[in-house]
Image (cartoon, rainbow, N blue to C red):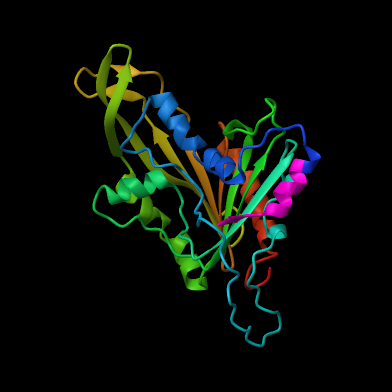
Amino acid sequence: MRDDPTFVERVQRDLHDVRWLGPEEIRSRARRRSQRRIVVATVVLALAGVSAVAVAAPGTSPSPVLPAAAPSASPTRHEITTDALLQPADLPQPVYVQLSQSGLGEPVLLDSVLGHCRTSQGLSDGWQPSILSRSQTLMRKPSTGMLVEGDALVMQDLFRLVPETATQLLATLDDLVAPCAEWRSAGPLETVGSTHTVEVVHRWAVVQRGFAGDDAAILRDSLTAARDVQTGQTFGHAPPPTLAAVVRVGDTVSVLRLAGDGTEAELRQLAVAAAARMCAAANPAC
């Protein structure tokens, strides 16, 4: 995916006294937040530590060559415009920065840890291919003079897929997470003066269905506290579950994550708002 330089430059002019990280680094750090929270709270784990990043293509992607639309009562939409994404007015708290990127041919990555769980068992990661996509991070005003991942409020990826693929993605979610219903991830943990081999149990489940758009689901990963595999000693407490909402409207699919300790109710509310916005991009039209 590529950054939107015009947008970033405009924000820099408006907030000239703020020292900015590069937009790509901001998004990368924001997307790693949920996984970093697992690492900090459970002190885990190199084995499962692939960043929970948005699907991204480095560099600048050329504009897609789009096929001509077949004659129909309503024209076929191709490009995903920014009005199909969540808007600041959809959030209960003020949004001061809105970073947007677009990409071509990206996989619909629901969660990198879920993908690692599957591939560690000899399975494919299960990600469906998209035609094109647009992603954004909505952020609050920085309090320290520099944007950091803690300033992120919501991360959203919006994809256009082949219609049959979009339908299949939601229809097969339960099968996708079934091998990870109870997955043990082990690795080293360094404490003062010693190194432990610890494990964390991930329990993936589809916990809500059909509450927005043409179809919708919430994925939840419930984790245990890190436990020493030899002594049974636990380190810290079990962290809050990690959550992702997946929403389909026509041939578009959106993946939403709340930063921090957002609840299922909050995520569900945003997913409903996202489904309404997705009508601006979906085929067939809402």
Where, quadrant-wise, is the N terminus in this rendering? bottom right
Is 203 contained in the magenta span? no
162 to the left or right of 101: left
Where, quadrant-wise, is the C terminus in this rendering? bottom right
Q: Position of residue 248 (x, y in %)?
A: 56, 60
Residue placed at 75% from the left, 44% from the top? 11
Q: Position of residue 124 (x, y in %)?
A: 31, 57
Q: Nearer the viewer, residue 250 or 36?
A: 36
Instruction: Classify residue 126 by image quadrant.
Output: bottom left
Position of 173 relative to 144 (above/below): below
Residue at the limit of the structure toward the right, as seen here: 14
Q: Which portion, as a residue range, is magenta?
A: 1-12
Instruction: Classify residue 203 by image quadrant.
Output: top left
134 to the left or right of 45: right
242 to the left or right of 113: right
Position of 155 relative to 175 (above/below): above
Asked whether residue 89 is in view, the answer is no
Residue placed at 66% from the left, 43% from the top? 138
Q: Nearer the viewer, residue 189 or 65?
A: 65
Q: Position of residue 94 (x, y in %)?
A: 75, 37
Instruction: Classify residue 229 by image quadrant.
Output: top left
Q: Position of residue 24 (x, y in %)?
A: 57, 46
Residue placed at 62% from the left, 84% from the top? 68
Q: Main secondary structure of the magenta part?
A: helix
